Amino acid sequence: MKKITILNGDIHPEKKIFSEYIHQVEEKLMSEKLEVHVFNINSMNLFYCKGCWSCWWKTPGKCDIQDDGSQIFQSVINSDFIIFASPLIAGFTSSALKKITDRFVCLLHPYIQIKNGENHHQKRYEKYPDFGLILEQEADTDEEDIEIVKNIYGRLSLNFHNNMRFCHFTESNKPEEIAHEISHY
Amino acid sequence: MKLAIINGSPRYKNSNSTLLMDQFLKGFSSKSEIAQSYLVGTENKKKALADFVESDTVLIIFPLYTDCKPGIVKEFFESLLGVENSVQKRVGFIVQSGFPESIHSEALERYLQKLTKRLGHIYLGTVIKGGVEGIKIMPPGMTKKLFGQFEKLGSYFAEFQNFDPKIMKQLRTPYKLSASRIFFFNLISKTGLTNFYWDMNLKKNNAFEQRFDKPFSV
Ligand SMILES: Cc1cc2nc3c(=O)[nH]c(=O)nc-3n(C[C@H](O)[C@H](O)[C@H](O)COP(=O)(O)O)c2cc1C
């Protein structure tokens, strides 16, 4: 484990609490001698996927949208571990985080393979980093919400040929615990 | 019934969601008011939210993106949190995807049910239909059955204000690939036929030789 990318999907960074927590995770990871890249999605120039398939059949592997997306794709695919970080909003990670996740499709190949008896797209790159979730709960978050979020991110890991290693909450885990756990993978 | 139909495709009007909705509306053919809106662009988003507020029944149709809702649809769901709930609405979803199996949409379906409950509305269910990518270029013979099913879904909805459970069940089959389908896939994958759609478009764009490019490798 050397290089970590943190995708911070906080859409209310002015409230400070969540993004400050993520900043602490970053510092603790650095003190574990890891290289850390944090992207605060909400303050970047990023557009939504248009569903144009340019990344699959016009300029293979490259998204057609001219914005900050490339920096993120480059960092993600060359990392050893990814953190999807977001407060839960309406029972799921933020639209900012989903905006960039949709566009990860450019990191896959259009060709199809069968995996677990299901259709999936093949790899474009040799390796896709494992990931973990760091979430903040809403006032009304319950067990079912958490199960659903894990369930959907489990599907994401099937699509991206990687593994979900943890789902932690700012309410119940300390930043140093998370950093320590990651440094031991 | 005051119906709002919200089309959440990032492809806007030129989408498979629109094609399917057109069939639904053909069947619906009722005199009741229908407000249609999209989620691409600021003005459209505002109209969609206003339509949601003013209707008593809402259908939201969108494509599956990474086994989940697309970012713009999630953004719309977030905007619903700020809406004052004066009337309880009846809300249904239509999720359509590239891969044919409904298992890809199952986790999302749980989310949509929970979301509707969280917002205090009545959940009408989620219609799931796979194998939809490419319908725009298919000859009519290949889409006849699918379009007929959506037309029926529409006429049933006009009459009963709900999804036809029989059609819903048909549309979400297969749940997973059958053993014979996997066998067939393995058999023809050697011929390149399984990737026909992608190869055809790669070639059309003179990008076939670059198809294995890894632009972000360092
Ligand atoms: C970024 C992106 C992600 C997608 N993810 C999935 C997926 O995870 N599973 C799937 O079956 N289809 C997936 N699709 C295919 C779309 O769901 C399918 O093409 C759909 O019919 C598009 O509908 P529309 O034209 O209404 O947008 C994806 C398409 C795009 C562009």
Image (cartoon, coloured by chain):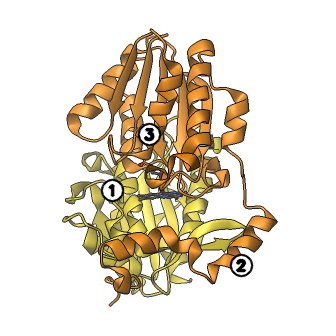
Chain colours: A yellow, B orange
Tell me the residue at 48%/67% (across/down): B197
Number of marks in picture: 3
Q: Amino acid at mark 2?
A: Leu
**Residue A96, relative to residue A31: is it above or below?**
above
Q: Earlier in the sequence, mark 3 or mark 2?
A: 3
Residue that numbered label 1 is attached to: A49
| Label 2 vs label 1, nearer the camera | 2
Name the quarter where the C terminus of chain B is drawn. Answer: bottom left
Q: Is residue B174 visible?
A: yes
Q: In the visual, does B128 lie left or right of B63?
A: right
Residue annotated with mark 3: B19
> Are the residues tagged 3 and 2 within 8 Å (C-beta)?
no
Q: Which mark is residue B114?
A: none
Q: Is mark 3 within 8 Å of ligand 1?
A: yes
Looking at the picture, how far across and down is residue B68, in whole percent?
Answer: 51, 51
Q: CA distance from mark 3 to mark 1?
A: 20 Å
> Left or right: where does residue B66 sit relative to residue B101?
left
Q: SS of the residue at dot 1?
A: loop
